[in-house]
């Protein structure tokens, strides 16, 4: 197989790209006639807006020749970054989790319990189910459809259900976000996760996009299909089912205690997410070793999406072939904390992501089409364990809670504090909106983030905004809005485990973002997948 890189596709051509056009492009790049090409398959597509001539797409395409023996010789005529020879046919070698040759679950082991139906728990349960373990997946929140109704109640009536919200329920926090599938890991199982999602109904585009995403609306259907496949494989899925304790004997798990009963088991896979604070507390009391870790806090910034498109695409902005523009920015700070943007949601909205009735926390989400008026992203400042005021492993949780409670006291409700960028830069409260209108529900109150976020966070964001504006024109636009606080960017602690993912408590496996070992949907899914694949897999 030949991998052809850096094929330029003009925007107008992208509107009617088909197999025939792709063949012509590859034949031209390889300097061969079209009839020598047997197959073509796009493996990557990205937007390149760097040139003065305007934006274009850049493609990577896999090609097989009819005379496959000639492929290596032909590749030798090009630089490796232009054309690479890859032995084998037109396949990436990856399989979905249902097609993996996994070792059977040991017959002498009881059914494992997986706690949490977010990415880590879901993929752990899928791997265990493929192995014949018949796992019991428990989730404190509700199914995704019930959860959507609870979130609608929160947004329209300002009523929070602490057990069913943006953070708790089927799919975890990622189910009500942008559904980003970017990942900093270097693992072949990233492809396994993506292919599994496609098999469960995610758009095939996630396999080739440079920055793949699914969107909240599409994710709901994917989750329901994944649940159906689990049940087909003999798994059991229980919603509104909260883990309240573990029975430990001789240093090992022997049962999972639930709010409504007990499950005898020798293996508990703990994928609780980064906001199960009550679970953190009793796990600490149980003796599970933990340590505080750095994370980040800040606020959501909103611009008009059309302004971001113009800043990123220039004269090409508005072309129907282009997706809504994204950005990822960072600048250093004098205290080495850094300020950076995180979880950018093109055409999305700012949402309430609280899990406690006396606190306010925000996040961002997008639908698959990303066709909303505003763009939003977190603007975050690094937080260190020494900021927590204590060396207790749960001190970071309390640090988050204090910020969220200060926000709640300011508004007296689940409304969020909103401040214009121009006012933040002048360090004054906002009293009125400008040209950018907030998308946050159940509503905002104009004011200042000072007194909610720590002074170091406000001061660093004030210092960083003009410099971020030099990196992305208009980022520091005065009418842009900062809505906050955002405190749950990642887990404030790490649960200790060995290379096999087992904690010092035998049979207990802390996984994913809540355990401090992942930073997004895909990395959490890979962590859970590997645990489900490998535990007792080589014994």
Image (cartoon, rainbow, N blue to C red):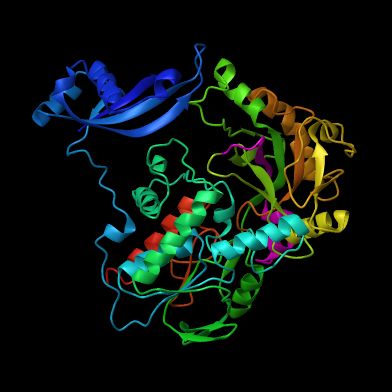
Is 275 placed above or below 518 here? below
Residue 391 among those drawn in magenta: yes
Is 402 placed above or below 347 here? below
Q: Which residues are magenta?
A: 370-398
Spot occupied by residue 315 in the image (x, y as percentages of width and height): 57, 15
* Left or right side of 397 for 22: left
Residue 222 among those drawn in magenta: no
Q: Quadrant of the N terminus?
A: top left
Is 118 placed above or below 237 here? above
* Left or right side of 40 for 507: right
Is 402 placed above or below 113 here? above
Q: Quadrant of the C terminus?
A: bottom left
Residue 8 in view (yes/no): yes
Spot occupied by residue 85 in the image (x, y as percentages of width and height): 21, 30
**Residue closer to the observer: 341 or 122:** 122
Question: How many marks are shown on the rendered structure?
Answer: 0
Q: Residue at x 77, y 59 (%)?
A: 157
* Residue closest to the far top: 53
Spot occupied by residue 478 in the image (x, y as percentages of width and height): 79, 28
**Residue closer to the observer: 79 or 488:** 488
**Residue closer to the observer: 475 or 516:** 475
Q: Residue at x 14, y 22 (%)?
A: 35
In terms of image quadrants, where is residue 354?
Answer: bottom right
Residue 360 in view (yes/no): no
Q: Residue at x 66, y 26 (%)?
A: 307
In terms of image quadrants, where is residue 495?
Answer: bottom right
Spot occupied by residue 248 in the image (x, y as percentages of width and height): 50, 85
């Amino acid at each position: 197989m030949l991998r052809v890189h850096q094929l330029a596709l003009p925007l107008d051509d992208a509107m009617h790209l088909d197999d025939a056009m792709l063949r012509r492009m590859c034949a031209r790049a390889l300097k061969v006639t079209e009839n020598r090409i047997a197959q073509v398959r796009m493996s990557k597509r990205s937007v390149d807006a760097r040139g003065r001539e305007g934006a274009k797409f850049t493609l990577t395409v896999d090609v097989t020749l009819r005379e496959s023996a000639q492929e290596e010789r032909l590749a030798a005529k090009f630089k490796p970054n232009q054309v690479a020879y890859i032995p084998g046919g037109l396949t990436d070698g990856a399989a979905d989790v249902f097609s993996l040759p996994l070792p059977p679950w040991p017959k002498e082991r009881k059914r494992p319990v997986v706690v949490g139906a977010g990415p880590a728990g879901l993929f752990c349960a899928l791997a265990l189910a493929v192995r014949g373990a018949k796992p019991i997946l428990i989730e404190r929140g509700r199914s995704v459809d019930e959860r959507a109704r609870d979130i609608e109640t929160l947004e329209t009536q300002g009523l929070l259900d602490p057990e069913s919200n943006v953070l708790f329920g089927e799919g975890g926090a990622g189910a009500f976000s942008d559904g980003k599938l970017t990942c900093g890991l270097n693992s072949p199982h990233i492809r396994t996760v993506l292919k599994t999602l496609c098999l469960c109904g995610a758009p095939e585009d996630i396999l080739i996009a440079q920055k793949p995403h699914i969107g909240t609306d599409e994710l709901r259907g994917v989750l329901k299909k994944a649940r159906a496949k689990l049940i087909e494989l003999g798994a059991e899925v229980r919603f509104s089912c909260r883990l309240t304790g573990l029975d430990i004997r001789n240093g090992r798990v022997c049962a999972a205690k639930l709010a409504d009963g007990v499950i005898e088991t020798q293996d508990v896979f703990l994928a609780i997410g980064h906001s199960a604070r009550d679970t953190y507390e009793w796990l600490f009391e149980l003796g599970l070793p933990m340590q505080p870790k750095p994370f980040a806090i800040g606020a959501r910034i909103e611009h008009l999406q059309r302004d971001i498109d113009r800043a990123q695409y220039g004269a090409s902005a508005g072309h129907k072939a282009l997706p809504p523009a994204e950005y990822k920015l960072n600048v250093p700070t004098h205290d080495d904390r850094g300020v950076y943007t995180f979880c950018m949601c093109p055409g999305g909205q700012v949402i309430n992501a609280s899990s406690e009735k006396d606190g306010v926390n925000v996040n961002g989400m997008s639908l698959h089409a990303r066709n909303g008026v505003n763009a939003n992203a977190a603007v975050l400042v690094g937080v260190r364990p020494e900021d927590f005021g204590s060396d207790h492993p749960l001190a970071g949780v309390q640090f988050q809670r204090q910020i969220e409670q200060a926000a709640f006291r300011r508004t007296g409700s689940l409304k969020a504090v909103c401040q214009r960028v121009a006012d933040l830069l002048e360090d004054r409260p906002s009293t009125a909106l400008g040209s950018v209108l907030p998308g946050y529900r159940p509503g905002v109150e104009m004011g200042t983030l000072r007194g909610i976020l720590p002074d170091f966070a406000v001061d660093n964001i004030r210092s960083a905004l003009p410099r971020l504006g030099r990196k992305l024109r208009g980022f520091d636009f005065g009418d842009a809005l900062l809505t906050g606080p955002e405190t749950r960017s990642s887990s404030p602690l790490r649960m200790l485990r060995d290379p096999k993912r087992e904690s010092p408590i035998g049979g207990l496996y802390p996984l994913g973002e809540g355990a401090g070992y992942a930073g997004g949907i895909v990395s959490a899914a890979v962590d859970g997948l590997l645990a489900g694949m490998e535990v007792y897999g080589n014994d």
